[in-house]
Image (cartoon, rainbow, N blue to C red):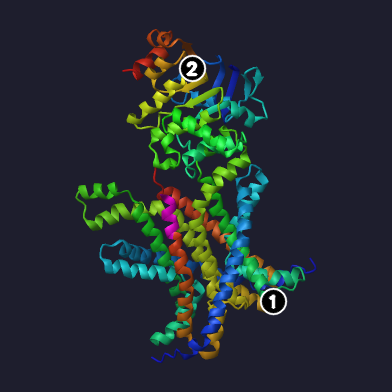
Amino acid sequence: MTYFFQMGEAYKYIDLLIKGMWLTLSLSALSIIIGLLTGWIVAIWKVSEKKILSIIASVYIEFWRNTPLLIQVFFVYYGFTALTGLSFTAYQAGLLAIILNTTAYNAEILRGGIQAIPKVQIEAAKALGLDSFHIWYTVIIPYVHRIVFPSLINQFVLIILGTSLLSVIAVPELMNEAKELQALTGRTIEIYLLIAGIYVGIIFIFSAIMRFIEGKFFTLRH
Amino acid sequence: MGFDWEPVIRYFPLLVKGAFFTILLSALSLVTGTCLGLVLAIFQLSKLKPLKIFSQYFVLIIRSIPLLLLLFLAFYIPPIIFKLDTSKFFTAWIALFLYSGVYATEIIRSGIQSIPKLQIESGLSLGLNKRKVMRLIVLPQALKTIIPPYIGLYTVVIKDSSLASVIGYIELARATRLGVMSTYRSFEFYSVALALYFLICYPLSRYSKKAELRGGQ
Amino acid sequence: MIEFKNVNKFFGNHQVLKNTNLLIQEGEKVAIVGPSGSGKSTMLRCINRLEKIQSGEIWLDGKRIDNTKEEAQLRQKVGIVFQSYNLFPHLKIQENVTLALKHVKKLSKSRANTIAYDVLKKVHLEDKLHAYPLQLSGGQQQRVAIARALAMDPPILLFDEITSALDPELIGEVLDVLRELSHSGKTMIVVTHEINFAREVSDRIIFFDEGCVIEEGEPNEIIDNPKTERVSTFFAKVLK
């Protein structure tokens, strides 16, 4: 290589990267948790017998799943302001866009899980006298989580990686900080490879934790 | 509220041109990515440990970094390390090629593995050699399983191609951005862009769902 | 003639065949019975090299086959029908039967189709030539599987619990085909749970358990006067 890897200078600014990483993680955590809750709401609407709820859910899901996250981010950040006169900070807009996006994907995953529950399970619950709320709370939701956990993990990983898009609207998460650092020090390749390593590390650890949780709480025991 | 649709209507042909390049870039990336995916899938199914491990780790790592980062690496590595002068199209293509390839691997591999082992044994028991069993029995059936998720992958690549705008390649997202930057009509432009992407992706995802239901028989 | 000499087979650490010795004459109809997991299927699958052995020898018509490289050749002489998933769902019945004729024996299309028609007639399904496997019942599918094996005209036929996965009312039609086949002069080895059928059709019954031959003999002898307790308990349970 005719280009020396010089990390030295970059180490001065490493705490910038760490700050970015924490923001990435907190954005991801918020999006994952809120997105799962809203995903459930939309999924329940989609399978509801009330046609109007089902249609609204379908439209929502199809819209957010068939358009790119990047444009969604731009739309929420720049376009929304024009629409409502409210102005979001980049952080708010980015978070909102990711949540709106992942809600749709989660809804689809959860819907698949709901429809995959053997009918007899629901019938058995009804026969025991459980009311609708309890059937959802004690039977359907836990069961669905066990069936679709791997797909959800996949989606969560995509969220973590997706936060990198917020760098285009200058949210100071990991990717953005890397760009800043690169502009500051000129050590382009070293920095980008470094954060590639950080992302891989984050995902590896995250996946391992998720697999552990899955084994402990979310496996259907045979 | 002040909506002015005139600029975006004026820009519309450019947006459509961008959409065309979006589809072109995505199609090329997916086709080449399939070749990569096939190779990696064969490695993962082979009995040679080093091939298997290499392929598994390769896929795992590419899937663990953001596409945007992959794009930047593809943008900076050729000129800085290899002293190659590459076009933006090439950069975008390389990143999407790797990305779609590793996702294709998963689809192809699980499609092939979904064929019951007894089918293969039936074929072998009739005296067919391994290659013929693959060609006549495994692959025709695997294809039916593979096609629906593959169409889904195509929509993913189309959406991800929007990232190519960040390095300046002119496809739909970039064209939209250019329009916004010169006319400040962000809501109008982005909503039209969303609509265009939707028009491209929605039919594909519907078709994929239909194909999935048909294949399930 | 098939011979097993001190055959041992392991799946990992688990020994599935223990010093198995077996001799099957040409044209014999042998039924192999015994509890599940006894190694019966594995033993059958060793004959056409779907399973490999760790020690011992297997001989077929004077040639040693456990270490052969010519597996495809071997398999042309040994037909096998499995418990399930025999047929190729993406091919029509006719294509299922002619596949090996065209690609292994390299027969012409017309010749292959003629043979296919003849064997399907033997199993009474000649009218299903252009149907797809999933359109047929389980019993019909198994009969086609038998026809497909017959099409290659192998001197040896192996049947691995071919009725075990069928609904009870469909078992009869498959056993009828086997009954008719027993007059064909081919060597037939049938792993089965259908004891009464075995008694009726086979020349010899072998009781297999925990990887070895426990007892073997004439059907009536072994079922009515078993020499070991294990065998008599088994038959008592199964024939209740």
Q: Quadrant of the N terminus of chain A?
A: bottom right
Q: Is residue B58 in the magenta section? A: no
* Element under disc 2: strand
Q: Residue A86, relative to residue B66: is it above or below?
A: below
Image spot of residue A188 (x, y percent) = 69, 72
Up-down: is A140 above or below C65? below
Chain letter for mark 1, please.
Answer: A
Q: Nearer the viewer, residue A157 or C219?
A: C219
Q: Is residue C157 above or below residue A3?
A: above
Q: Position of residue C222 (x, y in %)?
A: 42, 10
> Which of the two discs, 1 and 2, sits closer to the camera?
2
Subunit bearing disc 2: C
Q: Position of residue B27 (x, y in %)?
A: 58, 66
Question: Is B215 covered by the magenta stretch?
Answer: yes
Please report the residue visible at 51 percent of the width from the left and 28 percent of the height from the top. C150
Q: Secondary structure at mark 1?
A: helix
Tell me which corner region of the image, top left, top right, bottom left or bottom right, holds residue C142: top left
Magenta region: B209-217
- From the image, tell me which residue sits under label 1: A185
Q: Within 10 angstroms of label 1, few (less than 14), some, or many (20 or more) residues?
A: few
Q: Residue drawn 23% across and 57% down?
A: A132
Residue lying farthest to the left in this orientation: A129
Residue located beneath label 2 in the image: C30
Q: Image quadrant of residue C64?
A: top right
Q: Quadrant of the C terminus of chain A?
A: top left
Which residue type carries mark 1?
A: Thr
Disc 1 to disc 2, how far (Cα)? 82 Å
Q: Is residue A148 visible?
A: yes
Q: Position of residue B56 (x, y in %)?
A: 61, 51
Q: How many marks?
A: 2
Q: Nearer the viewer, residue C215 or B82?
A: C215
